Amino acid sequence: MIGGPKFLAIASLALALVQPARAQQTQPWTDAQRLLSDCSGPMDSPGYNSCIDYIEGIKDILNYLSERGAAGVRFPCPPSAITLGQLHDVVVTFIRSNPQYYNIAAAPVVYAALVSAFPCRSR
């Protein structure tokens, strides 16, 4: 669905990666504290579903950029069998462990959580 949370997450990250100066001038769709609040709600609640969609959107854009060989970007390398629930847990744990990120845009915080939890191994 164009315009939904997943689309906005993808667009936000793509804009931040492609045009960092311009992206910093725009208001983020959500910050890390709001994402944590949504992610902490009951499963199947609107906030929880928004959280899962947001995380999945960030994961999808990272996969897209990785497959196209975006230069100068460090990508996470999660196991192929990882579930959205596991990604949710990684992001929630990261945000709770880093309250200094509460008031910044959620997209780079989700990115940092994934890169931190799933670093790529040298080949």
Image: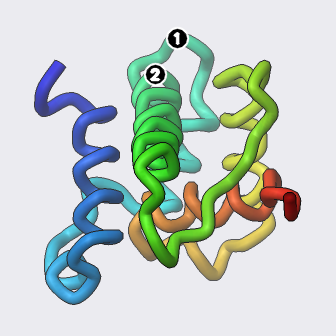
Looking at the rendered structure, the kind of residue marked 2 is Asn
Image position of 82 (left or right of 4): right
Query: The disc labelled 1 sits on which kind of residue?
Result: Asp
The residue closer to the viewer here, 27 or 122, is 122
The colour scheme of the drawn protein is rainbow
Q: Which residue is mark 2?
A: 49
Location of the N terminus by quadrant is: top left
Whether residues under marks 2 and 1 lie with C-beta atoms below 8 angstroms apart, the answer is yes
Q: Residue, x 70% and y 35% (percent of image)?
A: 87
Q: Give the answer, above or below, for where 28 lies relative to 66.
A: below
Give the residue pinned by disc 1: 44
For the C terminus, the quadrant is bottom right
Residues under labels 2 and 1: Cα distance?
6 Å
Q: Which residue shows up at 58% across the image and 29% down it?
A: 41
Q: Position of residue 55 (x, y in %)?
A: 51, 39
Q: Is residue 15 left or right of residue 46?
A: left
N-term-proximal mark, 2 vs 1: 1
